[in-house]
Structure formats: structure tokens, C-alpha cells
Image: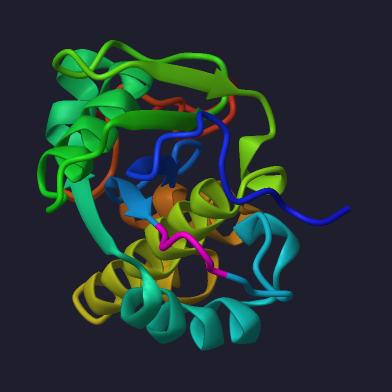
Amino acid sequence: MALKLNFSGFELECGTDEAGRGCLAGPVTAAAVILPKYFENDVLNDSKLLSEAKRNLLKPILEHQATCYATAMVLPEDIDKINILNASILAMHKAITLLDPKPTYIIVDGNRFKPFQTIEHQTIIKGDSKYLSIAAASVLAKTHRDAYMEKIHEEFPMYNWKQNKGYPTKEHRAAILKFGITKYHRKSFRLLPEQYHLDI
């Protein structure tokens, strides 16, 4: 099914999405994107349905063709303070704040959001596989976050974030058990299965 370009009828409609919500380490990253009126792309879809190669191919195309886009991060220490849902919404708000021109309507992937200024919004479940602007936001959030995780991998290569991007893989959890945690880990998350105890 082809993704739709617009939900509201407003020309400056922005789509927003986040990446990294279920990770044990690293930030939650959001993107907000306004696409031009006649934008088309047959490859673009929910970032989870695309290969890494396709996401990396789409990233410069989207950045070049978007009317405007922005990405923003909320770091682990803030995720621990305000919880991951609030951190995800905060990251989306931060990204929307950076858009120029300012959007006149916001469509959001998922079912939870908080009003942003006085701009009307709509949450859309599986919005990243229904609307092009949300799909574009999902790809940009994911590629920007992956690049950040690859960068901090150099600092702590034993966790293999280059590969697992901070998600709770067996290998990542085994490394936490062996080496403990870093400043990039989310202390409010269950970092190990219940039978193990971690000194935080």
C-alpha cells in the first residue's frame, strides 16, 4: 500500500517519530520532517521495514528534498529522570522546535503525545507505515541515532554498540554482566534479567 503524503490538508504538516526507545544504552532520538507538496519516493517506508543500506541511501535524499527537517536527542540521564515515554515526547518537541518554517499541523507516530505550543496534532498508530513524513522522520531519527551509537562504540567497544546500537541483545547483556555499566546506560531500565544483580 502506498504511503500518503498528507493527513490534515495543511501544507506545512510535519511528521515526527523517534528511535531508540527500547534500548538499554544511548539517547532516544527524534526527527521532525515537513515534505514538499509533490514529494514522491517509492522506497521510503517505516525504518524498521528497511535495511540499513536502504536507510543510509534515503538519509541524504530526505535531507536534500525535505522542505525542512530536524533531529534532537534526550540523553540517558534525562531519560532516567523523566522516564522513556516523556523523554520520547520531549525529543519530538525539541525536533519540532528547530523546524523552519514552523509547522501548521503535526502528525505523530504512535498513540501518545503532548500538545506542542498551540499547533494541532494527531497521533497515528503505525503512522510510519502510513504517511511519508512520519516514515521520513523514522528514517532520519534512526540513521542519526545509529551514527551516534557508532561514535560512542569507539569509547566502549566491549558492548559492540556498532552492531547492536544499544538494544538488549544477549551479547550486550553479557557485556553489562562482565564489565558493568557506562555513563551511556539507562539506569532506570532493567539492564539484566532478574536473576542477576547489578550495582548501580
Q: Nearer the viewer, residue 99 or 174?
A: 99
Q: Where residue 25 sits in the image (x, y, percent)?
A: 34, 48
Q: Where residue 65 sits in the image (x, y, percent)?
A: 38, 77
Q: Nearer the viewer, residue 69 or 147?
A: 69
Q: Where residue 194 sits in the image (x, y, percent)?
A: 57, 20
Horizontal side, residue 117 vs residue 16: left or right = left
- In the picture, the quarter occupied by the C terminus is top left
Q: Nearer the viewer, residue 163 or 137?
A: 137
Q: Where residue 4 sits in the image (x, y, percent)?
A: 68, 48
Q: Give the residue at x 57% y 33%.
A: 7
- Choose top left, top right, bottom left or bottom right for residue 94: top left
**In the image, residue 111 lies in the stretch drawn in magenta:** no
Q: Give the residue at x 41% y 50%.
A: 176
- Does the image show residue 75? no
Q: Give the residue at x 56% y 42%.
A: 6
Q: Is residue 20 above or below residue 186?
A: below
Horizontal side, residue 155 vs residue 50: left or right = left
Q: Nearer the viewer, residue 119 or 83?
A: 119
Horizontal side, residue 22 vs residue 71: left or right = right
**Way the structure is coloured:** rainbow
- Does the image show residue 159? yes
Q: Give the residue at x 27% y 60%.
A: 69
Q: Is residue 164 above or below residue 125?
A: below
Q: Which residues are magenta?
A: 35-39
- Choose top left, top right, bottom left or bottom right for residue 80: top left
> Is the stretch drawn in magenta largely helix, strand or loop?
loop
